[in-house]
Amino acid sequence: MSEKDYYKILGISKNASQDEIKKAFRQLARKYHPDVNKDADAEDKFKEINEAFQVLGNPEKRAQYDQFGTSAFSQEDLRGFRNQRFDFDDLFRDFGFGDIFDIFNHREEYQDYEEGADLKYDLEITLEDAFFGVEKIIKIPVHEICKKCGGRGAEEKYLKQCDKCDGSGKLKIIRKQGFTQVVTITTCDRCHGEGKIALKYCDFCKGKGRIEKIQKINLKIPRGINDGQYMRLEGKGELGKNAPPGDLYVVVHIKKHPIFRREDANLFLDKKIDLLTAIFGGEIEIKNIDKKIKLKIPAGTQSHTSFKLKKQGMPLLNSKRRGDLFVNVIVHIPKISKFKEKFLRKLI
Ligand SMILES: [Zn+2]
Ligand SMILES: [Zn+2]
C-alpha cells in the first residue's frame, strides 16, 4: 500500500499546532462534505481528509504516524477513520460549548485575541427564487467582545485574584495511592480557570463579556442555485477580538413546489389532458415558471406519456444553459352516462 502524506492532504506543515490542524480540517471538510459538494470525487476526498484528521487531530495517533507512517494502524482502523460520520451541521458547532473538537481542546491560557467563529444561516427560498435569482436581506446576530471590560465580564478594577486557586486558574489535587502520589490538575471551579473573580459585573455587557449586534446583510442568490448549496461570506461571521471575524455560511433550502419537482437542472410536472385530445391529438398550454409554452399532443397519446421540452428546465448555476422540462400527461377519463355508453360501445 502506498504511504499517504496526511500533512499534505490537510495542506499543513509537519509542525502544525492542533489548532491549525482543526482549522485546516474544518475548512476542507466544509468544502468537500458530500451533503453540499455534489462533485463525483467529493466523497472520496472527504474521506481522505477525514482519515488525515482522525490521525493528526489526535496527538497520540499523530505521534504513531510520525514514527511509523500509516503502517501504525490496521486496515480496519483506517477504514474507521475514513468513514467517521460528520454531519454538515457538526462542522459549524464550533461556537459555544459542546463542540465536537472539544475532545482535543484543552482550555488555553487567557489570550488577548480570539478569532471570530464561523456562523451558519439556513435560508429558505422558493423554486421561483431559485429560477430567477433573488435578493434577500437577512439579519444575523453577532457577538462582539465587550470593549469596556475586554471580554472579562468585569472592569479591571473590580477583578480580584481568585483565592481558591491563588490566581492560577488551576487546582492541584493530590491523592495517595499506596506508596505513590497521584497529582491531578483541574480547572478551578470558582473562577472557571480565569484566575480572577469579578466583584462587580461590567454594566455594559452585564458580565457576559460580549455584546450582541444585529448584522444586516444583503444577499444576492444566483439563479440556478440548488437545495443544500451554500454561499460563503468572508468576514461576516462572529466578530473576533484583536483578530479577524469568522465567515458566514448561508445554506440555501428550497421549499417544496406545489406543481414542479426538480432534479438538478431538470423540472418535472404532471399535466391533465382530456380524452379527446389524447385520442385525436391537439395542443395544450403549459405554465412554466417563466412563461407559457405550447405543447403538441400527438393523436393516440397514452396516459402517463412523458414529453421532454428541451431547455425549458432550471437554469444552471453560473451559466446561460438550462435543463429540460418533462411533462407527464395524465389522461382524464370522463364519467359516461348509460345513454352515451351505447353509442360509445358501438364506436369502439
Ligand atoms: Zn480560581
Ligand atoms: Zn463588559
Image (cartoon, rainbow, N blue to C red):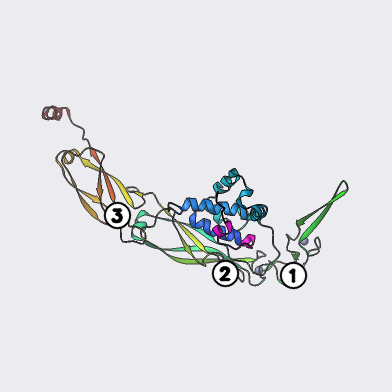
Q: Disc 3 beta carbon < 8 A from ligand 2?
A: no
Magenta-tinted stretch = 4-19
- Local packing at callout 2 (Cα closer than 10 Å; few below 14, some 14-19, many 20+) is some
Q: Whereabouts is ligand 2, in terms of quadrant?
A: bottom right
Q: Amino acid at mark 3?
A: Ile
The residue where tag 2 is placed is 244
Q: Are marks 2 and 1 in contact (CB under 8 Å)?
A: no
Relative to 75, residue 63 above or below: below
Residue 289 is tagged as 3
Q: Nearer the viewer, residue 322 or 221?
A: 322
Alpha carbon of mark 3 to alpha carbon of mark 1: how far? 63 Å
Residue 216 position, x and y percent, is: 48, 66
Look at the image and tell me whether residue 99 can be seen. Answer: no
Q: Label 1 is placed on what type of residue?
A: Tyr
Amino acid carrying label 2: it is Pro
Q: Which mark is residue 311?
A: none
Specify the quadrant of the image occupied by residue 18.
bottom right
Q: Left or right: where does residue 232 sit relative to residue 154? A: left
Q: Nearer the viewer, residue 65 or 156?
A: 65
At 18% from the left edge and 39% from the top edge, which residue is drawn?
278
Q: Is residue 7 magenta?
A: yes
